[in-house]
Each structure stands twice: as C-alpha cells, then as structure tokens.
Image: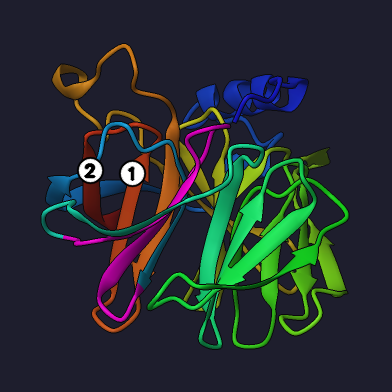
Amino acid sequence: MLKPSILALLLLSVACSKVGSGSSSSSLTKAPIYTFEVINAWPHDPAAYTQGLEIYQGMLYESTGQYGASSLRQVELQTGRVLRRLDVPSRYFAEGLTVFQGKLYQLTWQSHKCFFYDPNSFQLLGEFHIETEGWGLTHDHRSLIMSDGTNQLRFLNPVNFREEKSIKVFDGDRPLMQLNELEYIKGEIYANIWKTDWIVRIDPETGKILGWIDLKNLLPANERSASVDVLNGIAYDEAHDRLFVTGKMWPKLFEIRLKKR
C-alpha cells in the first residue's frame, strides 16, 4: 500500500527493541512472543503485490494490489502456477480477500467497494459499499472481519455488509495502528502490522493482544531484490493445520510452524 507511515510504528519498533531488557511498558513484553520454523518453501510470483491470501478447498487464492496491476488469482500451492486470474479494473487498488459461505470477497483500498465472486469461476456476483478504507479481510463462523489501517477491526454481516460490532486493539495504552492482512485461526485473529516483520494475535471478543510473531529474516537476504517489499499475507489451511505467509513481491511462499521464544 502506498500509505504514510505513522508514529505508532516507531513506538512499536521501540517496544520491540526492549524485549528481553526488562521493560514492562508495552504488552509486547507481556504477551507471548513466537518465532518460526520453516516447514516448506514454494515459488511465489515476484510480480504479485500480495494484499490478501486464502486457502480454500486445497487451493491458494490471492488478491494483488496496485493501480493498473490489481488481480484476483487461484494459484497452485506447490508450484506457484496461476491457474485462474481476473484482472481488476485499473481504477481500483485491490486489497484483502476471504472465502465465506461460498463467496469470495475482495476489498478495494480507497474506492469504498467490496466485490464478491463465485470462487470457482471468478464470476462477479455483486458488490458492497464500505464506509472506510479497505485493508485486510477474514471471517469467523458468523461475520466478515475487516481492517482499515487503524487499530479497529469491524465485524460485518456477509449478507448486507452492515457493521455488527467492532473492537479496538491497544499495545499497552497506545492504539496498535496499521493492522493489515487478516486471518482467523483457531479462535484468534492474526494480523500483519504494515511495514513491520510482526504478526499480532488478537482476541476477537476484546481486542486484547494474545501474542506476537517475529518473522524477521524469514525471506533470506540472498533472495531479496530491489523490488521485494514488506511482509504481507497470511493463510491458514484448517484441514491440515498449516500456516502460510508471504510478502509483497516475494519470490517464495512459506509454510511455517510457530515456536515460543
């Protein structure tokens, strides 16, 4: 996303640097911190500006962004081969996506629209108006859950897109801003924090921070190029209990296992 960074990210960086130093000023020092073990690494299109990632019926679905390059894709997991692609009209900057109740939902950034499709054919079925910017999207067993770049997560009715409730996420007494790509995993919301290598685990009832995942150095230095952008993209394969992550214009998609630090 082409959005300005804010003070909250600097504050988060400071808090992160204090881990292990005895600081208790941030919930980062109180909630569990996890690192990762790479289980598998598969090819990923380095031209894909990843905004949303989803596993559905054994296939990887991906929403890519940027004006004039946004797309909706069905991808073969092990090879990275794009099996189906729909180019989003150039006036839209595509964002997060999720599959829920037999429909594939795809947000746009600043156009106040969410499109929904048949996930098997990519036929456009309709669209909803959204009041805010659209960033990340996931769902629990009842509602769509959307981020908008702030510390607020909105729970939306999938039939009419009306807001049912919202929660706000705080790191100590500071709003944890720029919550981005989302995934609902075992009763928790996982959220990328834009422009960082951190994923935060959130209680969907209260907004409490349940844990932090440190993914620094996930993509090795020798696989980084000038075009590689930030970490972004979380997908969970519930059928096989597998967690996948990638980044914008990364050449690899990773299956990881979390380890408490």
Q: Which mark is residue 246?
A: 1
Residue situated in front as seen by the camera: 201 or 56 = 56
Q: Is residue 205 left or right of residue 218?
A: right
Placement of 159 over or under 92, stated as above or below: below
Placement of 13 over or under 152, stated as above or below: above
Residue drawn at x 68%, y 38% is 178
Q: Which mark is residue 44?
A: 2
Is there CB contact under 8 Å for labels 1 and 2?
Answer: yes
Q: Is residue 30 visible?
A: no
Question: Based on the displayed image, in which of its 4 quarters is residue 54 positioned?
Answer: bottom left
- Determine if the magenta segment contains residue 64: yes
Q: Secondary structure at mark 2?
A: loop
Residue drawn at x 47%, y 35% is 69
Reading the chain from its start, which is encountered first: label 1 or label 2? 2
Q: Which residues are magenta?
A: 56-77
Image coords of residue 185 (percent x, y): 47, 72
Q: Is residue 108 visible?
A: yes
Q: Is residue 167 left or right of residue 252?
A: right
Task: State the quadrant of the N terminus.
Answer: top right
Q: Which label lies toward us, 1 or 2?
A: 2
Placement of 23 over or under 157, stated as above or below: above
Image coords of residue 184 (percent x, y): 53, 70
Image coords of residue 3 (percent x, y): 68, 25
Residue drawn at x 69%, y 20% is 5
Image coords of residue 14 (percent x, y): 61, 20
Residue situated in front as seen by the camera: 135 or 129 = 129
Amino acid residing under circle 2: His
- Determine if the magenta segment contains residue 107: no
Residue drawn at x 82%, y 59% is 130
* Distance of label 1 from label 2 (alpha carbons): 8 Å
Local crowd at mark 1 within 10 Å, few (<14), some, or many (≥20)?
A: many
Amino acid residing under circle 1: Thr
